[in-house]
């Protein structure tokens, strides 16, 4: 019995044909002399009928249970009218089975193999091979696969060379925590799993490959959140002799092709806005704005600074700002209790309370309305209309930004104000600061990475006696629907600039050469101007599949404890393996 | 100055056009008012002329040195007749430069950037970015890239789904030594880097994906040889509901496409021979025969067992064999001293001496000729002709096989008897033993891996009281020119067979479930019949690029001490990193 097609592909075109199919028993209904079986394979479901006309096949069907693996041969016929199911491709036909075989039996699965199944996440991960049988999971991984083939094809057409870089690499400072791999030949030495192929791709440009592409695995030993995994996949690109503009144009063409190939969407890349980092922070409070939401942050500092509301005036006097969003139609939708909840949530950003006003026919209403008798200024500056809810942030610029970014996204979600007519809102964010202050490390770190080329007119900031933190960079992020899809830049290709950059990050010359000597030395042998980008495959696949967690687009993801519940990795290992590596554990 | 094309692509078609190019200075010849510069990019070389007509460009050219990175604009003109170089695409033209810019300077490289450079291997690896600039290295990596795009495209066309499997996986017994990754969240536990995605791809078939493909990184912490690296790349395939024959047919189609795409070779897959493992061992002494060599091993045991030559008769009495190869035209080519050298080499296989005879007009000549007065039997059985050299192996079957396999390949190399008219000699080797005896481990191990399905008629050998080592497997290797390109099989999809298999390998039921419980349990939930193959990308790229070491087709390979000389990985790491992992080193 050799399969002739997939179950899910059969429709009226097959009427009158004899087909052989293989797959899983989705459902079985037994009426004695008549048994219906829904047969499932990766393409969908078809209904099989076993009847007394063929006793042998009928007796095989009597044995069948959910998730048994079977092969059948039968004739494609019309269903009875009362059996027609217009929801599936094969809903008008069924298969009169003449021959059937059970290839593998199954115990009853711990959860139903169907979309939207309500099972515990750990249980689904433990039986991942069953979870992946569910049509929506099949679809998710096929979208991911389509993104990869589309990317490979585009890069191939554009003369990119696919080059693999090492997974067993060198541990370097800067960036996140490395995963380490002990060396057996040199006990006490370690490889590190790469956090990105960044340095290797720069070296490949130094080697003259001109256009590099790789679908690369990268690793970070960080605490995990919903959209983070210990290992993740980058679609990694690097080019020589191209400007930042040219690279963005290339990426636009790539993204356009991909959106068409994967979700049949005709993206107009001419309409993708390019915002400076400063503009994005000013208007949206974030460097990854969701442009499907129409309302923006408005700076009210100059208006409110003369008011009698101490919270606002003090914030401004302390060097901070007062900004607000006008949530369309929000006045009726949010009770005082709802607003209290929002106020409580934003404490995590450092906000101390949430000022608000409702715009009514009779002007501004709310606890702080009395401070703004001339409310028209506020209404005008925020562009608010009757029925809108004004939410304020007052204080340090970064806290106000984080607060109003959150409130903008949350209220848009609550009130369904995310514009569905523009489902794929891409944006470029450019002209980033070269450095940013890290609260975690309590020092300045590279906003992108230490190999990012400063703007040409800002190079002098790296000189002795100047403030390097004034410099902006030739860097660019691609944002989609409020998610950072990818991050890129022109790279430093001169040893002296790279040395200055590392010095600004606190490296002594010795430490710089210890960590990055091979790169610095390489730059002394003719490294071309170069730049590139890496797009996160996991996040892109998640968005295109309409999912909210990257686990849904990864075949065998880790849970939030970095454990893989099916194999239970990581595990204890043989003492001999540790001996070979010269490692000791505390309890040994 | 925006590049209009690649230097190496310019030929007479560009005559009269103004072009802008970017690349590296290969060579500079300075005649004062006239300077020639060979400009190199990834596509090749073009000659630039700087003359007094354009003083500014000329003065820039005066500064240029080897490996400087430059951009130029100029007019494509004919070369003077005495300057024509027919060896390169751009050999008839040159470029009269009107504008020039130095983008990066270079120190003098430690070796010349040219093909066949005679530099120390460690030096080349240390300056890998310079080594990779050499045209032959560029070509090698482009061949590798082409293989990958061809494979991706073929798999896409054939409805395979590209699915990534974890790099941070579980350590399992069997197979080679794992690379381990300490867990920070669970100190004392380890991930292992996968030796192949084998179990994951079986689980994906259990999950119903039906056709899986991945270009997958795999890892083995083994002692290194010329064609081994700590990390390597597999083109990994798995399918459901297909027989071994159908899978081989699919792989043939894939290989045919690839050979055409990559080396423009029209492979006739109908002519790829399929040999059983036993036949391959009998005829070639190896399971990866080089079929470009015409002469084979001939079993002479029945002929020589009645001779007076004790070495032969004793070998046979002890249960061994006597076999020989007839090296065409070898009689004159090998001196006694040459033969002594071969004899010395084969000691490593356990051979104790090398018996030989020369076939002359006057019959057999050589030290053992006296034992074979009726030499015609030997000449007939070996198919030898006048002028041939007979080389004998006598003793244990496996030692004779290894010895004569080596002698066959070595003599063919020495005498250029490798048939160049059949440059790509593929073969399928099928019907392997299920187990093989490992001298290293001093026990029986799986010949392929523990998940290989036995032949149906051999399943009973796994039952209590029978000898499992009699069983043969539904496995198949693809061989090219004496190299194993890939290895595949039908997999076990039944818990009970898998348990018997693990028992035959010495696992207790508890140990089997500890190591492979997730797989065994999965098989109880309806796993389909499945099979697949993995082709080694490194080795295939090496062969198609005409190289003899896989390092030549890997961008940043490790050396024989598993060190990467450029970055010097593996390295010492911060004490803090080890503390985070709960690891102690002996010297701490």
Image (cartoon, coloured by chain):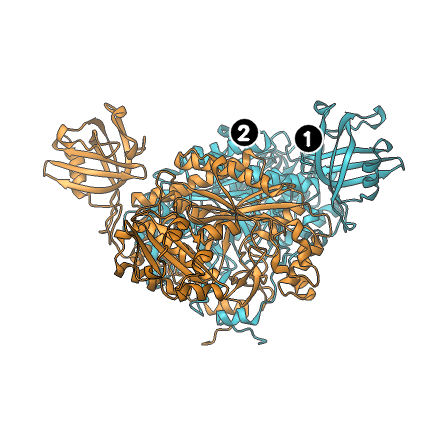
Chain colours: A cyan, B orange
Q: Is residue B146 visible?
A: yes
Q: Position of residue B204 (x, y in %)?
A: 63, 47
Is B189 left or right of A47, judged from the image as shown?
left
Check the residue under mark 2 and report the chain it is in. A
Q: Residue at x 68, y 52 (%)?
A: A125
Q: Residue furthest right?
A: A32
Check the residue under mark 1 and report the chain it is in. A
Q: Position of residue A71 (x, y in %)?
A: 72, 38
The foreground one among B432 and A416 is: B432
Q: Quadrant of residue A566?
A: bottom right
In the displayed structure, A538 sits above or below A254; it is: below
Label 2: how many Cα within 10 Å (few below 14, some 14–19, many 20+): some
Q: Position of residue B486 (x, y in %)?
A: 50, 48
Q: Position of residue A270 (x, y in %)?
A: 48, 28
Is A122 left or right of B445, judged from the image as shown?
right
Q: Secondary structure at mark 2?
A: loop
The foreground one among B265 and B315 is: B315
Q: Secondary structure at mark 1?
A: helix
Q: Which residue is mark 2?
A: A267
Can you tell which of label 1 and label 2 is closer to the viewer?
Answer: 1
Is A56 left or right of B69, judged from the image as shown?
right
Q: Quadrant of residue A116?
A: top right
In the displayed structure, B463 sits above or below A476; it is: below
Q: Quadrant of the N terminus of chain B?
A: top left
The foreground one among B267 and B400 is: B400
Q: Which residue is mark 1?
A: A9
Q: Earlier in the sequence, mark 1 or mark 2?
A: 1
Q: Residue furthest left?
A: B32
């Amino acid at each position: 019995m050799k399969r002739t097609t997939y179950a899910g592909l059969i429709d009226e075109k097959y009427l009158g044909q004899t087909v052989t199919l293989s797959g899983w028993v989705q459902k079985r209904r037994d009426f004695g002399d008549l048994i219906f079986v829904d047969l499932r394979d990766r393409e969908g479901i078809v209904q099989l009928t076993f009847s007394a006309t063929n006793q042998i096949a009928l007796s095989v069907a009597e044995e069948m249970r959910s998730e048994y693996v079977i092969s059948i041969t039968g004739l494609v016929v019309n269903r009875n009218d009362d059996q027609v199911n217009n929801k599936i491709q094969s809903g008008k036909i069924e298969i009169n089975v003449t021959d059937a075989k059970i290839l593998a039996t199954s115990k009853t699965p711990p959860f139903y193999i169907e979309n939207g199944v309500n099972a515990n996440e750990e249980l689904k991960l433990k039986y991942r091979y069953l979870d992946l049988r569910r049509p929506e999971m099949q679809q998710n991984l096929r979208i991911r696969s389509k993104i990869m083939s589309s990317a490979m094809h585009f890069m191939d057409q554009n003369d990119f060379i696919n080059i693999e870089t090492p997974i067993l690499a060198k541990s370097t400072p800067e960036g996140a925590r490395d995963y380490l791999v002990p060396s057996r030949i040199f006990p006490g030495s370690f490889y590190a799993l790469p956090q990105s192929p960044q340095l290797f791709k720069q070296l490949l440009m130094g080697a003259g490959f001109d256009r590099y592409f790789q679908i690369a695995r990268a690793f970070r030993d960080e605490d995990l959140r919903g959209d983070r995994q210990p290992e993740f996949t980058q679609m990694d690109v690097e080019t020589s002799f191209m400007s930042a503009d040219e690279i963005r144009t290339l990426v636009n063409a790539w993204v356009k092709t991909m959106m068409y190939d994967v979700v049949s969407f005709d993206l107009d890349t001419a309409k993708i806005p390019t915002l400076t980092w400063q503009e994005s922070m000013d208007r949206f409070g974030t460097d990854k704005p969701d442009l499907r939401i129409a309302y923006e942050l408005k700076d009210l500092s100059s208006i409110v600074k003369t008011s009698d509301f101490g919270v606002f005036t003090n914030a401004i006097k302390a060097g901070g700002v007062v900004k607000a969003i006008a949530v369309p139609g929000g006045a009726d939708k949010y009770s005082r209790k709802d607003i209290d909840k929002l106020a409580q949530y934003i404490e995590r950003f450092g906000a101390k309370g949430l000022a608000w006003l409702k715009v009514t026919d009779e002007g501004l209403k709310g606890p702080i309305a009395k401070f703004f008798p001339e409310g028209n200024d506020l209404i005008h500056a925020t562009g608010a209309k009757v029925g809108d809810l004004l939410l304020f942030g007052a204080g340090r610029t970064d806290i106000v930004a984080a607060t109003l970014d959150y409130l903008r996204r949350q209220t848009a979600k609550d009130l369904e104000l995310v514009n569905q007519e523009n489902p794929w809102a891409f944006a470029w964010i450019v002209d980033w600061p070269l450095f940013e202050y890290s609260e975690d490390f309590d020092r300045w770190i590279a906003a992108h990475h230490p190999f990012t080329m400063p703007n040409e007119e800002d190079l002098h900031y790296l000189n002795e006696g100047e403030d390097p933190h004034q410099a902006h960079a030739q860097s660019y992020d691609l944002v989609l629907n409020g998610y950072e899809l990818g991050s890129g830049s022109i790279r430093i290709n001169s040893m002296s600039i790279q040395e200055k950059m590392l010095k600004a990050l606190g490296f002594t010359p010795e430490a710089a050469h210890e960590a990055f000597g091979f790169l610095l030395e390489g730059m002394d042998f003719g490294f071309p101007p170069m730049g590139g980008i890496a797009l996160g495959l996991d996040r892109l696949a998640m968005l295109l599949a309409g999912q909210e967690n990257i686990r849904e687009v990864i075949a065998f993801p880790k849970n939030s404890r970095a454990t893989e519940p099916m194999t239970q990795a990581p595990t204890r290992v043989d003492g001999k393996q540790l001996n070979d590596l010269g490692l000791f554990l505390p309890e040994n």
